[in-house]
Image: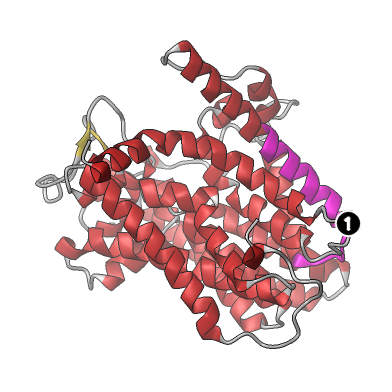
């Protein structure tokens, strides 16, 4: 391991200049942008709308159809839905009819709304603004991770690791919102550690508006205060979810009743055995040559086992480390992983890997705050690294074409 990634022997007490962490964060952002540029050039005919992964037979609003890159013979991916939300965040143009689950997609409003605001509502700029917003959250996540690393005796270059979280890799490839939530999760942990409650509160508000699972971060704060018998403070933290609740009510009223979606999905607590365990023992087969199929299935099992281990580690660390909102939030994500009992939820790594990236990050952040004299601190990083192996396989064909393009083959 390079010397600059090794932990120092003790926690750093000297303040780190913000420009140092910012430099590493800018580098992480530049790496993300470079990969996107290369994959758009060598894989997507230079069309940046390909990053939204729009399926060939997907209905597209007529205003957005010209120039839209379509993937042949696929249904597309979630990013295409958030693209439509970004172009019509207040449900005034009827774009919800092009969204698969409009009430669910519109609940996750933060990234699309920021893209709309950055483009000042100009339709021709919104796609680029959305891509920029995803990149800015990578920059923020890397910046906060660099600060956290220095605070706990690690080199600030560890901020680059944020670019390798599963949610970041998937967001840069498919324009999903989970990279933003993962970045906010890192910021939540950092600002709690440094004693900045107002900033924590702001990030909790934003997390709830990013995705429903952001409420688990709020839950970590509320439970922490309840256990300390600070009931008023717990109630204050709970109010961080009120803006999201108000937005949910607005969306519920504006979306046609035909498309209304339950708050709890059908795969939640419908059986006794966690779905990821079922999928581990019954991995999917792929229409690939036998060696590739075996590799994909093996990495599927590895990634699922990593999520399971992270959930168990979160619960164990809750008992072995000093109790905090960070450890409680990690345990809540762990319990959620065990509560998703439908095996179908665990079919594709891009689905569960991005949703549970906050779990992987919180486990890693919380574990390294303890003593590292045993030399086992790095084990907390293994779950994320193992999930990355499966995500990397999905990116393999794109990477190969990029290499061929650069080599002129």
x 29%, y 71%: residue:
117
Of residues 276 and 142, the one drawn nearer to the viewer in this rendering? 142
Q: Residue at x 11, y 51 (%)?
A: 63
First to last magenta residue range: 305-325
Q: Percent from the top left, x then y, of residue 190?
A: 66, 73
In the image, what residue occupies the spot 79% across and 43% down? 312
Q: Is residue 77 above or below residue 249?
A: above
Name the residue beneath numbered marker 1. Answer: 374
Residue placed furthest toward the top:
290
- Residue 173 at x, y = what percent? 37, 47
- Image vertical order of residue 307 relative to residue 172, above or below: above
Q: Dividing the picture into quarters, in which one does residue 345 lie?
A: top right
Specify whether residue 261 is painted magenta: no
**Which residue is at the front of the view, 153 or 86?**
153
Whether residue 400 sits left or right of residue 388 in the image: it is left
Residue 235 screen position, x and y as percent: 72, 72
Task: Count neighbours of disc 1 (C-alpha within 10 A) and say few if under 14, some if 14 to 19, many if 20 or more.
Answer: few
């Amino acid at each position: 391991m390079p010397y600059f990634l090794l932990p120092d022997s003790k926690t750093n007490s000297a303040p780190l200049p913000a420009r140092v962490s910012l430099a590493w964060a800018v580098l992480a952002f530049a790496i993300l942008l470079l990969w996107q540029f290369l994959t758009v050039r060598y894989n997507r005919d230079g069309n940046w709308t390909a990053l939204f992964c729009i399926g060939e037979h997907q209905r597209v609003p007529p205003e957005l159809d010209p120039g839209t890159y379509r993937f042949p013979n696929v249904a597309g991916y979630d990013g295409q839905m958030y693209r439509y939300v970004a172009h019509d965040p207040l449900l005034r143009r009827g774009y919800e009819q092009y969204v698969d689950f409009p009430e669910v997609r519109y609940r996750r409003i933060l990234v699309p709304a920021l893209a709309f605001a950055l483009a000042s509502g100009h339709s021709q700029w919104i796609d680029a603004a959305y891509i920029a917003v995803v990149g800015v959250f990578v920059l923020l996540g890397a910046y906060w991770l660099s600060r956290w690393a220095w605070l706990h005796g690690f080199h600030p270059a560890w901020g680059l690791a944020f670019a390798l979280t599963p949610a970041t890799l998937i967001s840069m490839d498919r324009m999903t919102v989970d990279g933003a939530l993962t970045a906010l999760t890192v910021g939540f942990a950092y600002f709690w550690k440094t004693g900045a409650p107002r900033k924590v509160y702001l990030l909790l508000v934003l997390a709830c508006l990013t995705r429903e699972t952001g409420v688990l971060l709020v839950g970590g704060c509320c439970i922490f205060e309840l256990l300390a018998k600070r009931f008023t403070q717990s109630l204050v933290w709970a109010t961080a979810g009120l803006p999201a609740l108000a937005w949910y009510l607005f969306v519920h009223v504006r979306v046609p009743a035909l498309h209304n979606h339950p708050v709890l999905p059908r795969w939640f607590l419908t059986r006794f055995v966690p779905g990821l365990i079922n999928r581990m023992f019954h991995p999917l087969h792929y229409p690939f040559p036998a060696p590739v199929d075996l590799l994909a299935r093996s990495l599927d099992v590895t990634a699922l086992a990593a999520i399971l281990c992270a959930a168990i580690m979160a619960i164990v660390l809750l008992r072995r480390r000093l109790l905090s909102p960070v450890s409680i939030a990690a345990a809540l994500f762990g319990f959620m992983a065990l509560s998703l009992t439908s095996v179908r939820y665990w079919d594709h790594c891009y689905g569960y890997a991005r949703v549970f990236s906050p779990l992987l990050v919180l486990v890693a952040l919380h574990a390294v705050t303890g003593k590292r004299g045993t030399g086992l601190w790095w084990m907390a990083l293994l779950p994320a690294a193992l999930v990355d192996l499966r995500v990397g396989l999905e990116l393999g064909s794109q990477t190969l074409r990029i290499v061929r393009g650069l080599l002129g083959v």
